[in-house]
Image: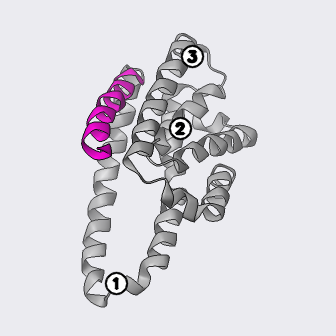
Amino acid sequence: LILTTLPAATLGLLLHKFIKSLFTPAMVTAALVCGACLMLLVERVLAPKQKNMPVQNLDQISALQAFGIGCFQCLALWPGFSRSASTLMGGMILGIRREVAAEYSFIAAVPIITGAAGYDLLKSLPLFTTADIPFFCVGSIFAFLSAIVAIRTFISILSRNTLKPFALYRLLLAVPVYFFMVR
């Protein structure tokens, strides 16, 4: 997990201001479309090979593959790209079966999302009061519980389907983001 977290954490810290500047409707729309196209490409090329992927369970992921997944995770520094999709696709490209890559993607989310949220919170600390603490606690608990449900559901869906429905969703979402937010 350290090797997976290191690339995005390093780039995220070095480019924090630049990354924040990318949070525009046009950039998010572009990331939605690029991410969807990459999902479709990865599925087209690698879906037929899933049963024969070298890595069939989490214990088989090598240190080099973990670092490679971390490099793919850097794509998610582009707002709208999807951290889970970038690591999942990276895992598939590196020879990891889709379901295993999805499971690892969610495990790898914990340190990078915790670190990014903590860093942003630290930078924004002067804006908060002690009255905000209960809201953060309740929000964190519900976010954690809903994440568990979402992860289990997503992995279950991926064991029966490809990334194509998620790619289609991203393409459909890009249309209103572009037309309602960019103009």
User: Disc 2 marks which amino acid?
Assistant: Ser
Q: Is residue 172 left or right of residue 85?
A: left
Residue 22 left/right relative to 150: right
Residue 154 higher or lower than 93, as above or below: below
The disc label shown at residue 86, or none: 2
Q: Which residues are magenta?
A: 163-183
Task: Name the amino acid, label 1.
Answer: Phe
Prevailing secondary structure class for the magenta stretch in the rendered image = helix
Badge 1: few (under 14), some or many (20 or more) residues near its Cα, within 10 Å?
few
The residue depicted at 26 percent of the width and 36 percent of the height is 176
Q: Could you say whether the residue bearing mark 3 is in a helix, strand or loop? A: helix
Residue reaching furthest right?
64
Q: Earlier in the sequence, mark 3 or mark 2?
A: 3
Q: Is residue 62 left or right of residue 19?
A: right
Percent of width and height locating residue 108: 54, 49
Cα–Cα span, label 1 and label 3: 47 Å
Image position of 75 with respect to 137: above or below? above
The quarter of the picture where the C terminus appears is top left
Q: Which residue is mark 3?
A: 46
Q: Residue at x 31, y 88 (%)?
A: 129
Q: Residue furthest top?
A: 48
In whole angstroms, how far apart are the C-alphas of marks 1 and 2? 33 Å
Q: Residue 120: give x, y in percent of width and height.
A: 47, 70
User: In the rendered structure, does residue 179 fall within the stretch colored magenta?
Assistant: yes
Q: Sequence-wise, which precedes: disc 1 or disc 2?
A: 2
* Residue 179 placement: quadrant: top left
Q: Nearer the viewer, mark 3 or mark 2?
A: 2
Residue under the image location 58 percent in, 27 percent down: 92
Residues at discs 1 and 3 in contact (Cβ within 8 Å): no
For the residues labelled 1 and 2, say whether their Cβ atoms are less than 8 Å apart. no
